[in-house]
Amino acid sequence: MECTVRWQADAGMAFVAETGSGHLLTMDGAPDGGGRNLAPRPMETVLAGTGGCTAYDVVLILKRGRQPVSGCSVRIEADRATEDPKVFTRIHMHFTVSGKGLNEAAVARAIALSHEKYCSASAMLAKTAQISTGFEIVEA
């Protein structure tokens, strides 16, 4: 896996990442740090990537378990250290999983498996942050 990140000098503190799979991701800083607030902050992309990683796992696990999942979202709230390096210290992930007749135990198991075994991103963040999860099921 590889990624190249290039500073866009003419755009303040904006950066464009090109992933090994050929996709582009733009990041920017806050105005008080020289950015123009035109894209997510780098640490926001870390949270978004973690949310994508764990939601992917949950959907895949539920599908493999033949659960009728039709939607999955995860809302992430995080706290960071006040001093550099400002690592994440607390992360809470609340999943909303929808489907017709989803088994509550299967959803709980999918979330637990993601965090205990499969999600590489949350495993890395767990080195500095206390991670908690919650979920709700929406009949759809």
Image: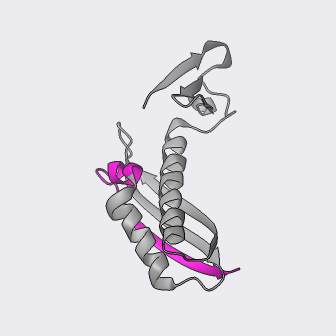
Residue 104 coordinates in the image, percent (x, y): 50, 84
Q: How many marks?
A: 0
Per the rendered image, the range of residues in magenta is 120-140
Q: Residue at x 35, y 40 (%)?
A: 83
Nearest to the observer: residue 88 or residue 103: 103
Residue 125 coordinates in the image, percent (x, y): 36, 50
Nearest to the observer: residue 65 or residue 97: 65
- The N terminus appears in which quarter of the rendering? top left
Does the rendering let one see residue 106? yes
Does the rendering let one see residue 131? no
Residue 89 coordinates in the image, percent (x, y): 36, 53
Q: Is residue 138 above or below residue 1?
A: below
| In-image side of 67 versus 91 (left or right) | right
Q: Residue at x 51, y 63 (%)?
A: 60
Q: Quadrant of residue 14?
A: top right
Q: Quadrant of residue 87?
A: top left
Residue 18 coordinates in the image, percent (x, y): 56, 26
* Magenta span includes 7: no
| In-image side of 31 versus 44 (left or right) | right
Q: Is residue 129 above or below residue 102?
A: above
- The C terminus appears in which quarter of the rendering? bottom right
Q: Residue at x 38, y 70 (%)?
A: 112
* Magenta span includes 137: yes
Q: Residue at x 34, y 55 (%)?
A: 129
Q: Is residue 34 above or below residue 131?
A: above
Q: Is residue 53 above or below residue 27?
A: below
